[in-house]
Amino acid sequence: MANIEAAGIKTFETPPGRRLVLALEDAGIDILHRCGGYAKCTTCRVEVLEGDPGEINPRERARLAREGDLAPNIRLSCQMLVDGDLTLRVINRLSETDLSDAGPRPSDELPAADD
């Protein structure tokens, strides 16, 4: 199991290979994921404070590049598969917005590269 610390919120365990956005949501953290896990928005951004977040996939790299001024430790939790212990900051939470829901729940698997 990997230990995930969402700074200022909680620490929990999740199995390696799990999409980070789902691990956070299932741990009771109200992270936004407005596009449903397809890297079409950036509402599921996290700031990786400690640990190795793993390789960035082409879909995530392309989407983050469109933002232009993000720090290199900003990642999309919908595109990350947990590989080890992480400390991170959840940037966008439903409770801090006037939205009615976080967005459609992402699937358990990363979408195919052409989705």
Image: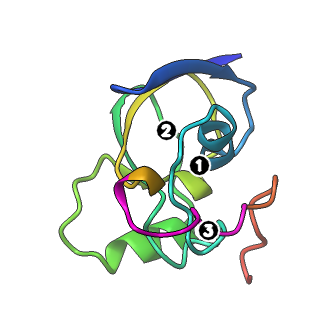
Give the percent coordinates (x, y) of residue 24: 59, 39
What residue do we see at 64% from left, 31% from top? 27
Confirm or deny contact between disc 2 and disc 1 (CB under 8 A): yes
Asked if 19 appears above or below 88 in the picture, the reply is below
Front residue of 97/52: it is 97
Quadrant of residue 20 in the image?
top right
Quadrant of residue 82 in the image?
top right
What residue do we see at 56% from left, 63% from top? 33
- Tag 1: residue type? Met
Numbered mark located on residue 103 in the image: 3
- Tag 2: residue type? Pro
The kind of secondary structure the magenta stretch mainly shows is: loop
Q: Going from the N terminus, do you reach mark 2 or mark 3 first?
A: 2
What residue do we see at 43% from left, 51% from top? 95
Which span is picked out in magenta? 96-105
Disc 1: which residue: 80
C-alpha gap between disc 3 and disc 1? 18 Å
Q: Is residue 112 magenta?
A: no
2 or 3: mark nearer the eye: 3
Give the percent coordinates (x, y) of residue 65: 34, 74
3 or 1: mark nearer the eye: 3
Asked if 48 appears above or below 32 in the picture, the reply is above
Numbered mark located on residue 50 in the image: none
Asked if 18 appears above or below 41 in the picture, the reply is above
Position of 9 with respect to 115 (left or right) is left
Numbered mark located on residue 53 in the image: 2
Q: Secondary structure at mark 1?
A: loop
Quarter containing the C terminus: bottom right
Position of 65 with respect to 107 (left or right) is left
Q: Going from the N terminus, do you reach mark 2 or mark 1 first?
A: 2
What residue do we see at 56% from left, 71% from top? 34
